[in-house]
Every structure is written in structure tokens, then in C-alpha cells.
Image (cartoon, rainbow, N blue to C red):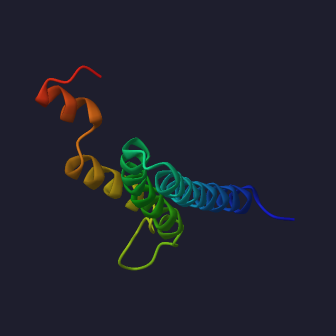
């Protein structure tokens, strides 16, 4: 019988795979809609979806990296990786409120 940790790992793998797949499907559907209608809103939404796809890709690989076991050089294994990736992401890409607030847009 599988342990609780194995079950949790399988759910994390499944969730990250589903999110990655959903992001990719949404981009394809939005691009198809843009080609069919010429709607610039769909094109910009697809471009925004690329950022979501990048985040989902980072999560997909981060979840797998985080499950690496501890070794001589990494006392805690890969468990510190998601925190580091999240900190990097938040420092490089400011949230929507900061970007819109700086320009003066009302969201």
C-alpha cells in the first residue's frame, strides 16, 4: 500500500500537470478565437496566457525538484526550492496592482 507521502506527491504531480495542460489549452483556444474573429482582446489575453504558462511550467518543474531527497550538499533536499523560486518570481514580476497603480489606472 502506498504511503501518505507517496499519495501527496502523486497529487502534486497531477495538479501541476493539469495546470500546465490547462494553460496550454487556453492559449491555443484564444489564438484560434483571435484568428477566427480578429479580436485584439483575445490576442492580448493569449499573450497574458503565456505568462501563466511560464508560471505553470516553473511550478511543474519546481514540484518535481522539491521532492529530491537530501544529500551531502543539500541537507533538506529540494524542499527549499519552491520558496526560492517564488521569491525570485515576485521580485522580477511585480503584481498587477503595483503595475496599474504606478501608471494610475483604476483596476
Residue 8 on image: x %, y %: 68, 55
Q: Position of residue 29 (x, y in %)?
A: 56, 55
At 53% from the left edge and 57% from the top edge, which residue is drawn?
A: 32
- Residue 85: x and y in percent read 34, 58
Residue at x 14%, y 23% (from the top left corner): 104
Question: Which quadrant would the C terminus be assigned to in this image?
Answer: top left
Q: Which of the two residues, 107 or 29, is positioned nearer the viewer here?
A: 29
Q: What's the residue at 29%, 52% (across, down)? A: 89
| 83 or 77, nearer to the observer | 83
Q: Residue furthest right?
A: 1
- Left or right: where 93 falls relative to 67: left
**Residue in view at x 65 percent, y 61 percent:** 9
The image quarter in which residue 94 lies: top left
Q: Position of residue 1 (x, y in %)?
A: 87, 65
Could you tell whether 42 is left or right of 73 in the image? right
Q: Is residue 92 above or below residue 67?
A: above
Front-lying residue, 57 or 107 = 107
Left or right of residue 2, residue 81 in this image: left
User: Residue 6's image quarter?
Assistant: bottom right
Residue at the outermost front position? 37
Counting labels gives 0
Instruction: Say left or right for 94 vs 78.
Output: left
Which residue, as the protein is rendered here, is positioned at the far top? 106
Q: Residue furthest bottom?
A: 72
Amino acid at each position: 500500500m502506498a504511503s501518505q507521502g507517496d499519495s501527496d506527491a502523486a497529487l502534486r504531480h497531477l495538479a501541476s500537470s493539469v495546470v500546465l495542460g490547462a494553460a496550454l489549452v487556453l492559449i491555443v483556444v484564444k489564438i484560434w478565437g483571435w484568428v477566427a474573429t480578429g479580436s485584439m482582446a483575445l490576442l492580448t489575453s493569449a499573450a497574458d496566457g503565456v505568462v501563466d504558462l511560464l508560471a505553470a511550467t516553473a511550478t511543474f518543474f519546481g514540484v518535481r525538484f522539491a521532492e529530491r531527497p537530501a544529500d551531502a550538499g543539500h541537507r533538506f533536499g529540494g524542499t527549499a526550492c519552491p520558496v526560492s523560486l517564488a521569491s525570485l518570481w515576485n521580485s522580477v514580476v511585480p503584481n498587477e496592482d503595483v503595475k496599474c497603480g504606478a501608471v494610475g489606472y483604476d483596476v
